[in-house]
Amino acid sequence: MHAAVVTEFGRTPVWQEFTDPVPTADEVVVDVVAAGLHPRVRSQADGSHYTSEGALPLVPGVDAVGRFPDGTLRYFAVASDTRGTMAERVAVDPRASVVLPEGADPVAVAAGANPVMSSWVALRRRIDFAPGSRVLVLGATGASGSAAVQVAKHLGAEHVVASGRDVTRLGALPALGADVVVPLDDVDAVGAAAADVDVVIDYVWGQPAADVMRALVTARQERGRRLDWVAIGSTAGQEARIPSAALRASGLTIVGSGQGSVGRAAFVAELPGIVAAIADGTIRVDATAVRMAEVEAAWAGQVGGSTGRVVLEA
């Protein structure tokens, strides 16, 4: 078979012949239909993700839509760091899969499940998220952030404040459910707009998160009211200088959400709802499909356009 193969961390995967997968007793071999090129996949391929095993060669890809031996079309995730989904075939544990609804677009599901999952699982599994809550999404102009705006509303948020650096994309978020949009560069404005939120979904971390945290806590009228800050991404930096006063003088609680803080079983349990929301259009996904054999060009951004998530299609 052929697969996208990484032989050196930091180098672009190459479409080449690779050994066929050998399934364990709990696995079946699946024909891959569509696999998303997520930021999570890029960090897997360059060895920088915190779950990296440091082993080479590897086939990148953490999830996909595939045709199972029983003929069903399913979304699935893989646990292996080295035998990923950017291949013609992959070994899969069927328990980590969900059958696509009739008429679902495999490309949309492959593009959307990963970014949707990040905020969906955070709200469902990491905090006690109540309908009617008010939410701030930091980093709302990326694929995961724009999905988070929609997820929050779908799961019952009353009011969503969206903040990000890309002003053009920020302007499109009200159509996806954002009630207020604020440029991330204006930290005081973000703090004022989000002064009474109950939850922050944070994809940026780094210094911008620390700055917004300080501004938000200062702007709150009821400082003792609980504020759940959920760290999911770190596009602005791996470390944030959090002032201790922000924790001592407010109801601020900081938690993370991702592999490790949420068990595999919890992720799998949420898959049916996630896939259904994408399939029926409740959560809109911007995706571009390119042939899997064009992985080198897709990786370099030479195909697939400038917006939306790129999906490698068999």
Image (cartoon, rainbow, N blue to C red):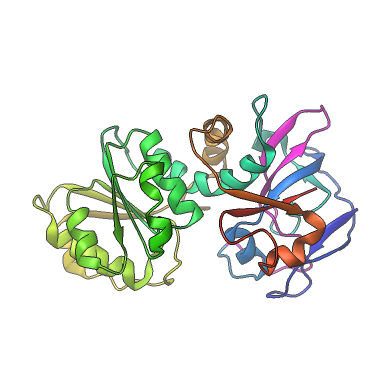
Is 166 in front, or is 212?
166
* Residue 69 forms part of the magenta stretch: yes
- Dominant secondary structure, magenta: loop
Q: Residue furthest left?
A: 221
Q: Which residues are magenta?
A: 51-80
- Rendering quarter of residue 31: top right
Q: Position of residue 296 (x, y in %)?
A: 76, 67
**120 horizontally vs 193: left or right:** right
Q: Report the side of 198 relative to 235 (left or right).
A: left
Please identify the quarter of the rendering in which residue 28 is found. Answer: top right
Report the front residue among 96 and 76.
Answer: 76
Q: Is residue 78 magenta?
A: yes
> Can residue 203 be seen in the rendering of this structure?
no
Percent across and percent down for residue 189 are 21, 62
| 10 up-or-down from 113: above or below | below
Q: Is residue 269 visible?
A: yes
Q: Residue at x 32, y 69 (%)?
A: 208
Residue 241, quarter of the rendered image: bottom left
Viewer-proximal residue among 210 and 172: 172
The residue drawn where x is 20% and y is 54% is: 193
Residue 226: x and y in percent read 20, 47
Residue 231 x, y percent position in the rendering: 39, 57
